[in-house]
Image (cartoon, rainbow, N blue to C red):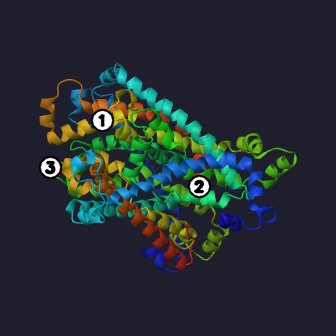
Amino acid sequence: MSVTAVPSMPKKRRKRQDRVFPVVNAFVLILLMFITLYPVVNTVAYSFNDGTDALRGNIGLWPRVFSLKSYESILSDSSVYQAAWISASKTVIITLLNLFWTGMLAFALSRREYVLRKFITTVMVLTMYVNAGLIPNYLLISKTLNLAKSYWVYIVPTMFSCFNMIVIRTYIAGLPDALVESARIDGAGDIRVYWQIIFPLCTPVLATVALFVAVGSWNSWFDTHLYCGGQKMLHSLQYLLKMKLATTQASANAAKTSADALKSTTQTTPITIRCAITVISTVPILVVYPFLQKYFVTGMALGSVKG
Amino acid sequence: MNSIAREAGNTPARRKGFWRTLLGQWQLMLMSVPMLLYVLLFNYAPMWGWINAFRDYSNKRNVAKGITPWCGLSNFEWLFGRPDFIQSIRNTLAMSVINLVFGTVSSILLAVLLNEVRRKSFKRTVQTVTYLPHFLSMVIVVSMAQNIFASSGPINGMLATLGAVKEPVFFLGEGKYFWWLVGVINVWKEVGWNTIIYISAMTAIDPSLYEAAAIDGAGRFQRILHVTLPGIKSTFVILLIMNIGHLMEAGFEIQYLLGSSLVRDFSTTIDIFVLEYGTEKLNIGVATAAGMFKSVVAIVLLVGANLVAKRLGEDTLI
């Protein structure tokens, strides 16, 4: 940038720079939005396209040969409903449990007079950096606790996240101390202070954390892969998609050219099915996202303050 | 326990005695100790499993009988003699460095551009759209990437229109593209989200600095260079430390989902290596040793980066 090297620029040039920049900037940002949204819309277009036709590729933002076949075949499959139920129920349970425990812990660790505060905080924060690793965790959960192949493996190991605790704690620390003190003088215990005074004030930050936890739970597939791969009844929606992903990947590799792929498939092909499942498992996130969006920006900014 | 009482400093603990104070705080304990126990069980107890790194699991017949003799450091020696383990270290570091550089540069750039937008509604629209991919699961993202990078997909279409290539490029099946593909997909997914932290640092910059710079004759670019970027320096350093601490985490899901047998020499990270040896080849000793190596290096990196930041007089993490 030669412009920046010049200490004081002639007035005309500076003015032009100030006038042109916003236009270029807006153009770049609009292009960025297009790049962000293109793959999403493209996937939706594929999911509504005819299966055999989709193998030719080159579908842009609109289906070429419109067809609802993929959705029909998915929605007539009972395993999809079972998977949706598993995904939804575990998401709700995990979110509630997380909010319950993490909120109380954050409140306790925000009280400066609490004698265990420093010790517990250190123990918690270290978990963000030190990890026993995959195999020891696997052995603990599947061998020692015997949680594998049961619904509980989704719930029990994911009840707490230190990052979320810090987000809530930072928010509570920003509330006036007098709130707690006056309630204590009136004779309220800490538990009551939390649930009656602090908890209602924390709605924005709790909404943020709820979003993080719910999205994380809804999006997880590896727990199913690791612990419940053989249990058809426990498959989540993301795991179904993951299995479809593996099959299309394999067939794409087996037949490097689309001509071979055309020969090998006659009815509805995995590509459109995969895209339809992708759409189905994205929709819940797209639905809650706009409602919670106003909260999470503040929440994230809070969490960035160091533990 | 004494040390904790000392750490509590001049709290009531000093006057009333540690145990009496603690007893008086039973409600706070009720709210926090259950999660303390939970974390000890799920985050700390598994570290006991590291002893498996020093046991021999290679003889399947012995393992079935429950005989796993101590073997000293031989698992580690075996690992470092394996070309595929060395390769997995290379892949992990390569992809995390690419992610770190691409991710940091792109998010700072976007944050600067957003910071220059005057119209609030446009800014919010861009933010809403660019945050969205962060909330999509890696399975969904990889599913979309399979369409985008397919040989008949839009990227190849664009390259063909521009005349850059004659034959469609087989992005997903050639090892040399894999690291860059992972970098690009990660930027697409996280660039918007990663700006949040920089934008909040930028809003903390005193507006009078911009005014003073403008009066001194600084143009847009000079204001960005001399006011905005110095204003986010400490945020940048903290994030850099955190990221260096996570240098051994190149991500795991994306490589696992996007990779295939065709690109495995470039897609196998340490985590995938551990998963293969631990759950498929069932050599728990070797898998634990590899995972332990990764954790220990991560701790060393974190502490090291923290020390450097302290020397430079920046905020530190721990």
Give the camera-side residue of B19 and A155: B19
Give the camera-side residue of A114 and B232: A114
Q: Mark 3 — residue?
A: B167
Answer above or below: position of A114 versus A202. below
- Local secondary structure at mark 1: helix
* Image spot of residue A225 (x, y percent): 35, 39
| In this rendering, position of residue A109 left or right of residue B232 | right
- Local secondary structure at mark 2: helix
Whether the residues at callouts 1 and 3 have beta carbons within 8 Å, the answer is no
- Local secondary structure at mark 3: loop
Label 2 and label 1 in one chain: yes
For the C terminus of chain A, give its image quadrant.
bottom right
**Amino acid at dot 1:** Met
* Image spot of residue B222 (x, y percent): 52, 72
Give the camera-side residue of B108 and B275: B275
**Dot label at residue A303:** 2
| In this rendering, position of residue A249 left or right of residue A29 | left
Number of numbered discs visible in the structure rendering: 3
Q: Nearer the viewer, mark 1 or mark 3?
A: 1
* Image spot of residue B126 (x, y percent): 50, 49
Q: Dot 2 surroundings within 10 Å: few (below 14), some, or many (20 or more)?
A: many
Residue B74 seen in render:
yes
Whether the residues at callouts 2 and 1 have beta carbons within 8 Å, the answer is no
Q: Mark 1 — residue?
A: A243
Please tell me in which quadrant of the rendered image residue A66 appears. top left
Answer above or below: position of A279 versus A142. above
Please tell me in which quadrant of the rendered image residue A277 appears. top left
Please tell me in which quadrant of the rendered image residue A186 appears. top right
**Mark 3 to mark 2: distance in Å?**
48 Å
**Mark 1 to mark 3: distance in Å?**
30 Å
Q: Can you name the residue that lies furthest to the top here?
A: A76
